[in-house]
Amino acid sequence: MTVSLVAPNSQLWWRAWLDRWAEWNERRARTRRLHVAESVSLGEKRFVAVVQFESQRFLIGGTGTSLRLLAELKSDEGTNSERSEGK
């Protein structure tokens, strides 16, 4: 005989909560306008990253104490795979 430690109503509540959380998380991901497209660590708390905001892309450099805009990337520049394929 198996005894459930969680009451059936409690299981339904958790399932409903998880469904709502998943829906909220999916909606939030769709509306996110700013994200790090790529990032490379240069060691000693230094990095270079491509940050995208809507359709704009920026090359950002950073250290442990500063952040700097290195370049605004043109939207017609392809990704590395597109450039390597000669597109």
Image (cartoon, helix red, strand yellow):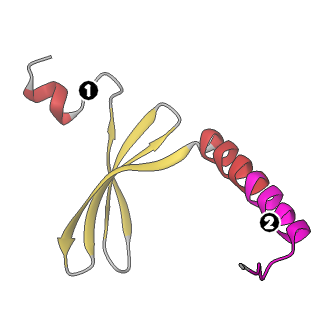
Q: Is residue 40 above or below residue 55?
A: below
Residue that appears at 16% across and 31% down: 81
Q: Is residue 10 magenta?
A: yes
Q: Is residue 21 above or below residue 77?
A: below
Report which residue position mark 1 lands on. 77
Residue farthest toward the front in the current orientation of the protein? 1
Residue 33 position by quadrant:
top right
In the image, 81: left or right of 31? left
Name the magenta segment's main secondary structure: helix
Residue 66 percent location from the top left of the image? 38, 73
Question: CB atoms at circles 2 and 1 under 8 Å apart?
Answer: no
Label 1: how many residues lie within 10 Å, few (<14), some (14-19) or many (20+)? few
- For mark 2, does the 10 Å Cα neighbourhood hold few (<14), some (14 to 19), or many (20 or more) residues? few
Distance from Cα at disc 2 to Cα at disc 1? 46 Å
Q: Is residue 6 left or right of residue 25?
A: right
Kind of residue sitting beneath label 2: Trp
- What residue is rendered at 80% in x and 60% in y? 17
Residue 14 is marked as 2
- Quadrant containing the N terminus is bottom right
